[in-house]
Image (cartoon, helix red, strand yellow):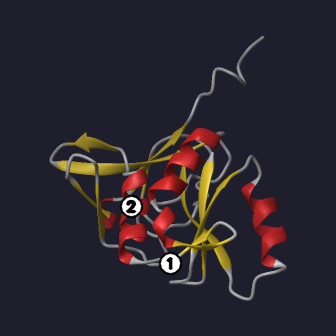
């Protein structure tokens, strides 16, 4: 997975490819004066990280940190637009998680992971931290509204289900 880290609310960003982002964040936080937080996560490995880095190369500050200018932030937001399911006339965002009892991937509305007990189903949004946008836009331009809630889905990785 590729994680995009930001220092503070509007500080520089860094692209990291790691299997343990929380550990990486804890280590880096010891040496950084601002709170570091994950603002985006997308599937990918070293090739995708290199592609992202080369796209925003002109905004490099140093040591893998990039200026959080409008072009960079817009590019990061476009990397992973939320999926949705249409129920009646409403488009409901989908939040994925790795296992039935793990936290979700980052919420498109507030930018934080959520914990929702076990079972995949519809949940009311409970975004209490972060920016908590009223709506986000899917790749096809559909608006997904926070007040419509979201659907929790567990990813079923065949790698882990081998006998």
Q: Tell whether 88 sits left or right of 65.
A: left
**In which quarter of the view is residue 16 placed?**
bottom right
- Determine which residue is flagged by label 1: 130
Q: Position of residue 10 (x, y in %)?
A: 50, 84
Q: Tell whether 140 sits left or right of 37.
A: left
Secondary element type, mark 1? loop
Secondary element type, mark 2? helix
Q: Earlier in the sequence, mark 2 or mark 1?
A: 2
Q: Position of residue 74 (x, y in %)?
A: 36, 66
Is 77 rendered above or below residue 155? Answer: below
Q: Position of residue 99 (x, y in %)?
A: 66, 39
Q: Position of residue 4 (x, y in %)?
A: 58, 61
Q: Mark 2 touching mark 1, by CB under 8 A?
A: no
- Determine which residue is flagged by label 2: 75
Q: Tell whether 24 sits left or right of 131.
A: right
**Residue furthest to the bottom:** 33
**Is 75 or 161 nearer to us in this picture?**
75
Q: Tell whether 109 sits left or right of 37.
A: left
> Can the viewer see residue 61 in this picture?
yes
């Amino acid at each position: 997975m590729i994680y995009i880290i930001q220092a503070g609310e509007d500080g520089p960003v860094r692209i990291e490819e790691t299997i343990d982002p929380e550990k990486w964040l804890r280590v880096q936080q010891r040496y950084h004066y601002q709170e570091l937080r994950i603002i985006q996560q997308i599937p990918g490995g070293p090739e995708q990280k290199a592609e992202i880095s080369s796209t925003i190369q002109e905004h490099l500050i140093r040591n893998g940190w990039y200026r959080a200018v409008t072009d960079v932030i817009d590019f990061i937001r476009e990397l992973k637009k939320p999926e949705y399911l249409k129920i009646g006339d409403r488009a409901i965002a989908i939040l994925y998680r790795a296992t039935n009892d793990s936290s979700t991937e980052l919420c498109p509305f507030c930018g934080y992971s959520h914990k929702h007990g076990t079972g995949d189903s519809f949940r009311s949004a409970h975004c209490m931290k972060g920016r908590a946008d009223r709506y986000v836009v899917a790749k096809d331009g559909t608006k997904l509204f926070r007040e419509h809630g979201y659907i929790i889905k567990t990813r079923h990785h065949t790698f882990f289900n081998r006998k």
